[in-house]
Image (spheres, grey):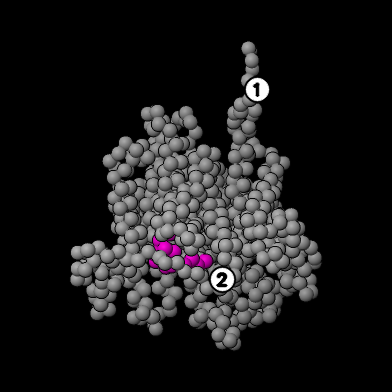
Amino acid sequence: MSFRLEPRDHASVGLKLTVSLAAGVIALLLVAIPVVAAGGTPLDAYWLMLQGAFGSMFALSETLNRATPLILTGLAAAVAFRAKLWNIGAEGQLYIGALAAVCVGSGLLQLPPALMIPTVMIAGFLAGGLMMVIPTIIKQRFGADEVVITLLLNFVVILFIQMLVEGVLKDPLSMGWPQSVPLIAEAKLPKLLPRLRMHWGLIVGLFAALILWLMVRKTVLGFEIRAVGENKAAARFAGIPVDATMLKVALISGGLAGLAGVGEVAGVKGYLSSDLSPGFGYSGIVVAMLAGLSPVGTVIAAVFVAAVFVGADSMSRATGISSYIADLVVALSLLCVLVGSFFLRFRVKFERRQVGA
Amino acid sequence: MDVLFDILGSANFWAAAIRIATPLIFGVLGALICERAGVLNLGIEGIFVAGAMAGWLAVYLGAGLWGGVLVAALAGALFGLLHAFLTVILGLSQHVSGIGITLLATSVSYFTYRTALPDVTSPPRIAAFQPLNIPGLSDLPFIGPALFQQTPLTFLALVFVAFVALVLYRTPLGLAIRAVGDNPASVEAQGLSVVGLRVGAVVVGSALMALGGAFLTMSAFDAFFFGMVNGRGWICIALVVFASWQPGKALLGALLFGAFDAFQIRLQTQIGQVVPGQVFLMLPYLLSIVALILVARRADYPRALLQPWTKGQRH
């Protein structure tokens, strides 16, 4: 018995779904090893995680609350990666979006909520977008790799935010805590249900996924993004404005990450601080990859990753197993889905050696 | 200007510059070996964390300091092997695999630390490497304290620079490694294994990266902290381009970077009242970005960087 690999020209939707699902399941199964190493029982741990993520209305709300920024940073990564623009800077773009929300929404403008909320969102989108447009221009002008620049900018942005919330933006009423002045009530995103933290940012995220899905399928820009992502030289030869398309992708990608920041400030916290995001930007990359860069898939993958984090927190409180287990699941699912992409490209053919043929 | 001369004139400043440069020397060398063989290793940031944690933990649990260094290198090699399997053997995206390795190595390290030491509030300390006293050299006025009072790992880093340069430019193995990152078809035509060379380079390079992390917990500090690597790995990836993939220039780049960082720390104590501290802390990252932009156009990337190889492939 031997096997050979045949390249596939096309992977079906069913196969892609199977690969993503298998990646999530295998990642969850693999963390049984660290759970046992930490002295826990895997089945109990899984059950507690499931309960913690979906077991009550409160748990479900927490999971969806956590999924909200992940949908947006996931879409940010998905749209950029489709065009082979390696935006690893969603974390920084998220903070810059949040910063713009605070600059516009903490009293500078006085508008009724119906105008104020869109204003804050547009500000956050543009600021986040600009944060990705700059490295893209640097890439086009100077040929400097956007991966390293966006990664390094994440650190610069966090320090910049720290400087502001300890300095000019510091809330004088915060009892010395390094946090910004709060948003005015008109700028805050309403809650979806009373007494739960879920907010309208979730609807924004779902709406963004829908728009992106339509854009990818039905618009010229969507076609151009796909063409640029598949083969830049061919796209340029076919008359597609490659540089302009990349800049549009950068604006959309950074803008979506910026919106994630707006949602966290205007929907959850109400103010800006340098611990606004526990790595939503980086987790967004995993979300996008799990989703096979599909906008609809991003929503599902974001809920999965959010459930892992919320479930692990709750499991950790009950068992004492470190909640870093969630980061392990997320990292493992990224690597599993990467291995899975191998099977999307190749068909494994098993063949029995023919005797005497 | 007086401030400038005060800083540059102190032996303490030069010693700090070399100390800050040491983990970067390891990291840039490691990244350089991987990239010379045609594989971008964005796992570097996580491998730093893994090396820092594994080395420290081994010593904390009773191993000797050099035993800890070995454990760190092995941890790095292991993650390197995983990266090599995904990118070289399966030919998958080097970007995605690297980010995945960074996430995995970081979370494995943090989880292990938390699990091994569940109840500690302040990070436990080990007896870290002490500065060597080299007879004759360490006692020289100014030069001694400036250059020759470093811990053994710093001298090890310098030895590695010479060794890597020697292997790359003076041995058949080095020739093969350089060729495999530039023109893998020519290597295969000679009957050498492209896959074997690349896997080996990534494993060895990753082990070196982990030593950069080990320096942090076993020489620069004597404990492990969350977030202590803080982008040093990414800075190394920028420095490799700055060094045009040459060991000598990598050393120079790391030392320049260390000098700049040591300088800003001292400047901070001088004019820190006027300028917020974060401005100084941003400088290393901004400097890396500027360095990258300045050299990017002229950068002579290994021509097969990022390109997977399948046996018998022709161009």
Residue B264 at least partly seen: yes
- Quarter of the rendering occupied by the N terminus of chain B: bottom left
> Quick check: A68 left or right of A194?
left
**Residue B31, position in %: x, y?**
41, 51
Image mark for residue B261:
none
Residue on which the image places disc 2: B120
Residue located 51% across and 38% down the image: B89
Q: Quadrant of residue A274?
A: bottom right
Q: Residue at x 76, y 64 (%)?
A: A60
Separation of marks 2 and 1 at Cα, in angstroms: 58 Å
Circle 1: residue type: Arg
Q: Is residue B135 magenta?
A: no
Residue B289 visible somewhere in the drawing: no
Q: Nearer the viewer, residue B133 or B196?
A: B133
Q: Is residue A167 left or right of residue B299?
A: right
Q: Which residue is label 1 attached to?
A: A352
Q: Nearer the viewer, residue A101 or B223?
A: B223
* Residue B197 percent coordinates (x, y): 42, 38
Q: Which residues are magenta?
A: B213-226
